[in-house]
Image (cartoon, helix red, strand yellow):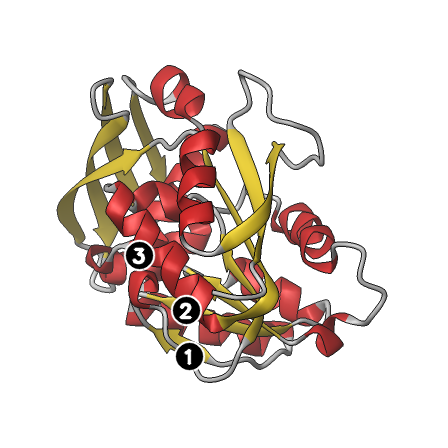
């Protein structure tokens, strides 16, 4: 599976309750993702020049954490992580992963648009395309506003998402099929320029314990957001010092970048 499709599937599995039954084979499909490099990049975004140790900075909330691939790695680096996801089953998989990694952090089942946790956090993360799954700008504003409320003054919001170039040119009108031990899928995409969104029709076949295959079909939509559009919403919901990076770099995005990363600081006074 190519990286563009892999990261898109990763986000979809994390964000939608319909994938609860698929959580057990999620990590099998994501075995080509370099989570170590992803976590190292987020470590640099979170430290942001800080000389203190990660544990001294305060709580870091990862929204749409899925099975916890980044959560556990950042926790192992010393950050005080809290994982949040809409899927209870995905969080159960994350709990197993925490035991395997030898880390322990709270996990909360919650819609990130209604993010509410006690105390003030140092940072809020939304990684691996989670923002693309919010299909309406109002949903994005709700999430940004909720993140601002749980962040302490000067706290960081860090996120990444797939670009319009990726959704339109790389995966927008394509078909993908793959068979792996114990599962297979057929995936048809169609891009809609008016809404800057991709419709994904996916049929899965997952082998059960008795050897028979269970078939289920899902339809999903992902939306592209331009950096300027996101910056405007961030300013409106209480953020400043907004930075946009292309790929896993500290450089400005290029037209053919597949991903963009944003870092913003909560204003001192809301």
Mark identifier at residue 84: 2
Q: Is residue 95 above or below residue 38?
A: below
Is 198 situated left or right of 171 in this image? left
The x and y percentages for residue 117 are 42, 79
Is 37 situated left or right of 177 in this image? right
Q: Looking at the image, do the residues carrying marks 2 and 3 touch, with CB atoms under 8 Å apart?
A: no
Residue linked to disc 1 = 117
Q: Looking at the image, do the residues carrying marks 2 and 1 touch, with CB atoms under 8 Å apart?
A: yes
Q: Which residue corresponds to the image point at 59% horizontal and 36% vertical from the top-left?
A: 244
Q: Which residue corresponds to the image point at 24% horizontal and 17% vertical from the top-left?
A: 193
Q: Nearer the viewer, residue 48 or 183?
A: 48
Measure how far apart labels 2 and 1 are at the Cα level: 10 Å
Mark identifier at residue 142: 3
Looking at the rendered structure, the secondary structure element under dot 3 is helix
Q: Earlier along the polypeptide chain: callout 1 or callout 3?
A: 1
Q: Count the marks: how many?
A: 3
Q: Is residue 69 visible?
A: yes
């Amino acid at each position: 599976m190519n990286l563009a499709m892999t990261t898109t599937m990763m986000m979809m599995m994390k964000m939608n309750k319909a994938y609860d039954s698929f959580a057990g084979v999620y990590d099998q499909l994501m075995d080509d993702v370099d989570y170590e490099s992803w976590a190292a990049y987020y470590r640099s975004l979170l430290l942001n020049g800080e000389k203190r140790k990660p544990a001294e900075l305060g709580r870091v909330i990862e929204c749409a954490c899925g099975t916890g691939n980044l959560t556990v790695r950042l926790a192992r680096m010393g950050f005080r992580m809290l994982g949040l996801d809409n899927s209870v089953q995905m969080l159960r998989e994350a709990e197993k992963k925490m035991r395997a990694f030898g880390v322990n952090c709270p996990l909360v089942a919650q819609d990130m648009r209604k993010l509410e946790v006690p105390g003030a956090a140092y940072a809020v993360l939304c990684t691996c395309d989670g923002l693309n799954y919010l299909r309406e700008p109002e949903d994005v504003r709700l999430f940004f506003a909720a993140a601002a409320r749980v962040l302490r003054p000067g706290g960081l919001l860090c996120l990444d998402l797939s670009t319009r170039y990726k959704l339109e040119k790389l995966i927008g009108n394509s078909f993908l099929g793959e068979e792996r031990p114990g599962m297979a899928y057929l995936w048809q995409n169609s891009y809609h320029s008016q809404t800057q969104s991709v419709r994904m029709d996916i049929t899965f076949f997952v082998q059960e314990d008795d050897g028979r295959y269970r078939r289920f079909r899902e339809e999903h939509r992902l939306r592209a957001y331009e950096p300027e559009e996101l910056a405007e919403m961030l300013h409106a919901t209480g953020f400043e010092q907004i930075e946009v990076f292309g790929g896993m770099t500290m450089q400005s995005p290029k037209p053919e970048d597949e991903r963009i990363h944003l870092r913003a600081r909560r204003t001192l006074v809301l």
